Image (tube, rainbow, N blue to C red):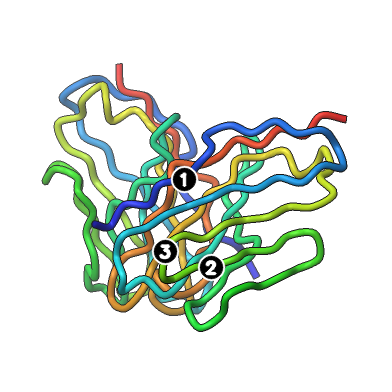
Amino acid sequence: GENVEQHPSTLSVQEGDSAVIKCTYSDSASNYFPWYKQELGKRPQLIIDIRSNVGEKKDQRIAVTLNKTAKHFSLHITETQPEDSAVYFCARGGGTDKLIFGTGTRLQVFP
Amino acid sequence: KAGVTQTPRYLIKTRGQQVTLSCSPISGHRSVSWYQQTPGQGLQFLFEYFSETQRNKGNFPGRFSGRQFSNSRSEMNVSTLELGDSALYLCASSLATGETGELFFGEGSRLTVL
């Protein structure tokens, strides 16, 4: 019940296109949903997060949406650029539970 | 402010040996989490420590253990190494407990078991 499913595992887009990564969870106690970006050979870094009392959050070209009823949340990247190429991880946490990550999505943006 | 520091960065061991990895969190951070990263498996949670107490533990065998010291530095130990333990071990620190706040990751310790 604590796993997070993340899709797709790989995603290739043309520069300027949008990219969407989706995650689903099963633990209804989850109330914190961060997204981390890991560039090749580097450490994961938080890019955006959302809490359960909010349905959507935007930060420039990235946005996250949350549907608590359906237990899924998504990362949207608009106007993709080559520097967006990385592995993206979704995660869920809440209460006294641990932060659990999805298996990652490798995004490639072709110029 | 210095980031999360992990040592050693790279190490090679043989099956049956044991290994100790060290993590120094960002100054002022009291929570330290450990994750195992392997291709295709993402970031798998090992354990989290807060103020020297283990708060949570992942689904790893008892060969994996950890501890946290009074200065918040943390160590993890893997005994009786197996080939499947080859991975990048990431440590992350946070101000509060990790499940509701930003994690700051170290660069990791890459373990190869031969």
Number of residues whose C-alpha sits closer than 10 Å to that of mark 2, classed few (under 14), some (14–19) or many (20 or more): many
User: Image check: A76 left or right of A92?
Assistant: right
Mark 3: which amino acid? Answer: Ala
Residue A47 coordinates in the image, percent (x, y) = 65, 61
Q: CA distance from mark 1 to mark 2?
A: 14 Å
Q: Nearer the viewer, residue A41 or A95?
A: A95
User: Label 2: which residue?
Assistant: A66
Does the CB distance between marks 2 and 3 fall below 8 Å?
no
Residue B94 coordinates in the image, percent (x, y) = 47, 71
Q: Secondary structure at mark 3?
A: loop
The quarter of the rendered structure image containing the N terminus of chain A is: bottom left
Q: CA distance from mark 3 to mark 1?
A: 15 Å
Mark 1: which amino acid? Answer: Gln
Q: Chain of mark 1?
A: A
Mark closer to the observer (2, 3): 3
Residue B65 coordinates in the image, percent (x, y) = 19, 51
| Label whose residue precedes the other's in the sequence (1 or 2) | 1
User: Label 1: which residue?
Assistant: A6
